[in-house]
Amino acid sequence: MMGVAQLARAALYWAPALDDPLHALGSTWLGRDAETGATLPQPAQQGFELWPLTADPRGYGLHATLKPPFRLSGSYAALRDDAARLAAATRPFELPPLEVASLSGFLALREAQPCPALQALADACVAALDPHRAPLTEAEIARRRPERLSDAGRYNLHHWGYPHVFGEWRFHVTLTQRLAPEQEAVIRPAAQAFLGTAAARPRRVTELCLFTQAAPGEPFLIAERLPLGG
């Protein structure tokens, strides 16, 4: 059994299935495969270097956050069992087409239309698995700059460990760091050309991905793909 001291953080994410073309293309765009941990050669781009612009999302892996990364209050085995039960009790559902969009200066894949089933899954992950989350330290709270958050964001931070959950949550698969407008003007068309067809294809959400981080500063990896049931 993996204990608290042997694991820095865990998270519950959506990630494309292994046979989904978006898994290979999105991982190549970021420069790392979160399934295997392998570093991947990124697509060559005219006029900019992609590697430094994808540093942060590369560390987390290609994903959309459902329950944000957290330190464990107990064992990994207990978290895994509860996450598997949650997945098994959730019906698979259709995910709307994804498209490259700008989100607060970052490029990300966003759903083309709202998906209530996706929101419900994110909400369930946050609430049902929260007993496995160790409380935030004062330093962790301060790093989130609570004075800059909305009332809802501050409430979420103190009660759920992260400001952007429930009504503040937005599905997004981060593709870059924050970009200046002149960078986005060049990089957004490149991302659309590289990922657009794969992102827009029909897909079903059939699994919940449990990601883990072995030590602070280490990249996140897909520990398990838990099948949805319902």
Image: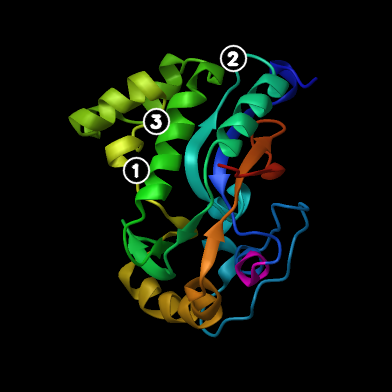
Q: Residue 31 at what x, y percent from top left?
A: 66, 63
SS class, disc 3:
loop
Under mark 3, the amino acid is: Tyr
| Residue 103, quarter of picture | bottom left
Residue at position x 77%, y 22% in the image: 2
The quarter of the rendered structure image containing the N terminus is top right
Q: How far separated are the C-alphas under marks 2 and 1?
A: 24 Å
- Sort mark 1 into few (<14), some (14-19) or many (20+) by Cα contacts within 10 Å: some
Q: Which residues are magenta?
A: 20-25
Q: Nearer the viewer, mark 3 or mark 1?
A: 1
Amino acid at the residue labelled 1: Trp
Q: Looking at this view, is 103 or 89 the one in front?
A: 89
Question: At x 52% / y 75%, what residue is drawn?
Answer: 201
Residue pictured at 56% horizontal, 32% vertical: 86
Q: Earlier in the sequence, mark 3 or mark 1?
A: 3
Q: Where, by quadrant of the figure, is residue 124 drawn?
A: top left
CB-based contact (under 8 Å), mark 3 and mark 1 = no
Q: Residue at 70% of width from left, 23% of height from top?
A: 76
* Most frequent secondary structure within the magenta stretch: helix
Contact (CB < 8 A) between labels 2 and 3? Answer: no
Q: Amino acid at mark 2?
A: Ser
Spatial CA span between label 3 and label 1: 10 Å
Q: How far from the left and from the top, in percent, is residue 132?
A: 56, 19
Which comes before the other along the chain, label 2 or label 3?
2
The quarter of the image holding the C terminus is top right
Separation of disc 2 and disc 3 at Cα? 16 Å
Q: In terms of depth relative to the viewer, which is nearer, 151 or 54?
A: 151
Question: For mark 3, what is the residue?
Answer: 162
Which residue is identified by label 2?
Answer: 73
The residue indicated by pointer 1 is 169
Mark carried by residue 195 = none
